[in-house]
Image (cartoon, rainbow, N blue to C red):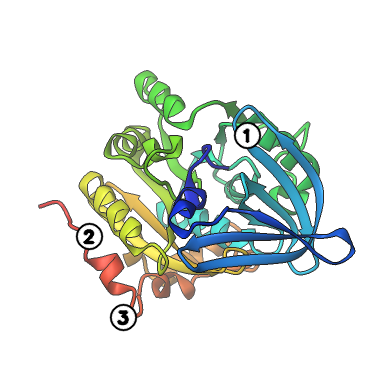
Amino acid sequence: MREPDGGKTAILAEAGGISGREGASRRGHQTWTEWLAPGTGTTLGEITVLAATRSAYQQVEIGENPGLGRIFRLDGVVMSTEADAFILHELMSVPMAAVHGTPRSALVVGGGDGGSAFELLRIPTMRDVVVAELDAEVVRLAREWLPGIHRGALDEPGDPRLHLAIGDGLGLMEAFARTGRRFDLIVYDLTEADDGSPAAALFTTHGLQTARRCLAPGGALSLHLGPLLHRPDAARLLLSRLRQVFPNVAPLAAYVPAYGALWGIALASDTLDIAAAPAASIAARLRQWRLDTALRAYHADLHPALFVHPRHLQPIFDSASRPA
């Protein structure tokens, strides 16, 4: 799901804390605490650990608690849960797919829990979904323990349209770019990146330019901006980089209970103005795809509202520099 040492973990030195600190709880359960910023964090209690392994890259754990169901985390950082994974997976996949209209190929960078792959595979025009996951152990444990998130996308034998590519995400994209392989949609299903982590390379200008080279004409990219109110400067920086590479960048925000934060997402494209798509056209597309009542977060009337931001978020979303 994420490159090692990236995302929320790397900011914890500032807080003087340890991400994913375990504490004793009742009946031998664990308490998982994760810091988002100095003095601010999220605690999940009554955790039963179902599986854990140290891979060549990171600590991979599957837990469970009464409120969130199965919980997937890497190096002490919660990636997704059964209760709310659909929020980001839908918003990072379906809006840009609906505006595109006929996506036939998609690349998920990260996404080893299979949630983004599931959302892309239920688009009826889709013919090829590549999941480029760094860590084979993530896929192995997700396949066994997270069917409530991947919902069959990782099953073996599974959907013949799904292809797993185990390896470094940026390296795989560079190889795709060299060979001329193009995708209609690219989903960066990673946590937010911090300088010094391998994930950070995907979010540099070079990494974003490489993603752009992998997009087919009319294609679109989605990625996380991270916890907006806890790390506004990081979101501004990433939006600035995106706007140096893509003419059309549409940020949005969604609250994710497991993260305990208002989470930012950006959708970017050379040609698609995703934010301007009218609700009526989105509604027609979702009906055509028979997704109009199947989705749990996204719907046609929500689409234009996603891109209308409250005043306190406007300085984060609007202050980033745009190319001349």
At mark 3, the secondary structure is loop
Contact, CB < 8 Å: mark 3 with mark 2? no
At x 24%, y 67%, the residue is: 318
Question: Which amino acid type corresponds to the residue marked 3 in the rendered image?
Answer: Arg
At mark 1, the secondary structure is loop
Figure quadrant of the N terminus: top right
Q: Nearer the viewer, residue 27 or 252?
A: 27
- Measuring from the top left, give residue 94's x and y in whole percent: 51, 56
Task: Point out which mark residue 161 bears.
Answer: 1
**Label tally:** 3
At x 80%, y 41%, the residue is: 144
Looking at the image, residue 109 lies above or below residue 304? above
At x 41%, y 51%, the residue is: 100
Task: Tell which tag, 1 or 3, sits nearer the viewer.
Answer: 3
Question: Which amino acid type corresponds to the residue marked 2 in the rendered image?
Answer: Ala
- Measuring from the top left, give residue 149's x and y in whole percent: 70, 52
- Measuring from the top left, give residue 65's x and y in whole percent: 78, 63
From the viewer's perspective, is 285 left or right of 159? left
From the viewer's perspective, is 9 left or right of 232? right
Looking at the image, residue 103 lies above or below residue 305? above
Between the residue at mark 3 and the residue at mark 2, the CA separation in whole angstroms equals 15 Å
Between the residue at mark 1 and the residue at mark 2, the CA separation in whole angstroms equals 38 Å
From the viewer's perspective, is 245 left or right of 77? left
Q: What residue is disc 3 on?
A: 311
Q: Which residue lies furthest to the top in this view?
A: 179
At x 22%, y 60%, the residue is: 320
Task: Point out which mark residue 320 bears.
Answer: 2
First in sequence, mark 1 or 3: give its number. Answer: 1
